[in-house]
Amino acid sequence: MVKIFLFSILFLFSTSIIHSQNRISLNVGYGYYLSNSENSTKIMGDNKYQSFVLYDFSYQRDSLFGFNLLFEYSYQQITKINIIEFIRYDPGPFPSPPPYWGNMKLVNHNFDLDYTAKINNYLSYGIGPSFIIVNRILEVDTVLYDKLASSGLGVNGFAELSVPIYGNKKYFFFTSKLKFRYTHSIWFDKGIRNLDDYKQEYFTVQILAGIGYAF
């Protein structure tokens, strides 16, 4: 699946000189987990992955074999501080040293490839497949660093508002977007872990805003 996404990106960019109506945009946004399977694991306890900030890049190609296609990459990270305690025991006559505390970090790299269509000159929508790369990291001071790498597949959909700022034949535009994404894990770099009953399932809603350039 990674190869398919990379091939799609290279193909879209390789034809950009021949065809017109290309759009790129940089966005920042706020996201919220409507559902996150990590929140039901014992290690999380009462700590939940909920809201996050994300950074986003998109590239759109219009009229490619009759289709309007958009590639989008976004990055998000959530860190939960001191969610698990490791007790240090000293059998000697001195008081036991203070405990270690562990932090949990969830890092997502999201790749979306969407078919898009216009509602009018300002509003559009899109839908398509999603591929994600996830790193779930447990850090305990300088004592432990444990990273579980995984990937997943899913689907996304969005509605977008674009307001152009014209200048000759090329123009900048402001953009805002409401987006939903559902993904489910398909692969884990599990090493010696037993992950028979473990899965990663995410359902997010995101609001993004940014600026773009059409050429």
Image (cartoon, rainbow, N blue to C red):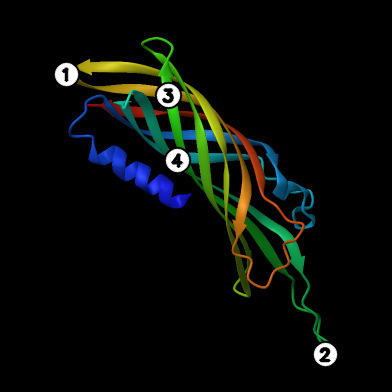
How packed mark 3 is, by other alpha carbons closer than 10 Å (few <14, some 14-19, many 20 or more), is many
Q: x%, y% of residue 64?
A: 31, 28
Amino acid type assigned to the residue bearing label 4 in the image: Tyr
70 or 66, which is in the foreground? 66
> Which residue in the structure is indicated by mark 3?
116
Kindly indicate the quadrant of the structure image that contains residue 123: top left
Of tags 2 and 3, the one toward the viewer is 3
Tags 1 and 3 in contact by the CB under 8 Å rule? no
**Label 2, label 1: how far apart the Cα atoms are:** 79 Å
**Residue 41 position (above or below residue 201):** below
In the displayed orientation, state which residue is furthest to the left.
Answer: 168
Disc ID at residue 198: none
Marks 1 and 4, the one that precedes in the sequence: 4
> Which residue in the structure is indicated by mark 2?
92
Amino acid type assigned to the residue bearing label 2 in the image: Gly
Residue 205 falls left or right of residue 72:
right
**Label 2, label 4: how far apart the Cα atoms are:** 51 Å
Residue at (73% x, 56% y) in the render: 198
> Which residue in the structure is indicated by mark 1?
169
Marks 2 and 3, the one that precedes in the sequence: 2
Residue at (39% x, 13% y) in the render: 122
**Label 1, label 4: how far apart the Cα atoms are:** 28 Å
Q: x%, y% of residue 170?
A: 19, 22
Residue at (84% x, 87% y) in the render: 91
Of tags 1 and 4, the one toward the viewer is 1
**Residue 205 position (above or below residue 82):** above
**Residue 14 position (above or below residue 170):** below
Marks 2 and 4, the one that precedes in the sequence: 4
Of tags 2 and 1, the one toward the viewer is 1
Of tags 3 and 4, the one toward the viewer is 3
Instruction: Give SS at disc 3.
Output: strand
Disc ID at residue 55: 4
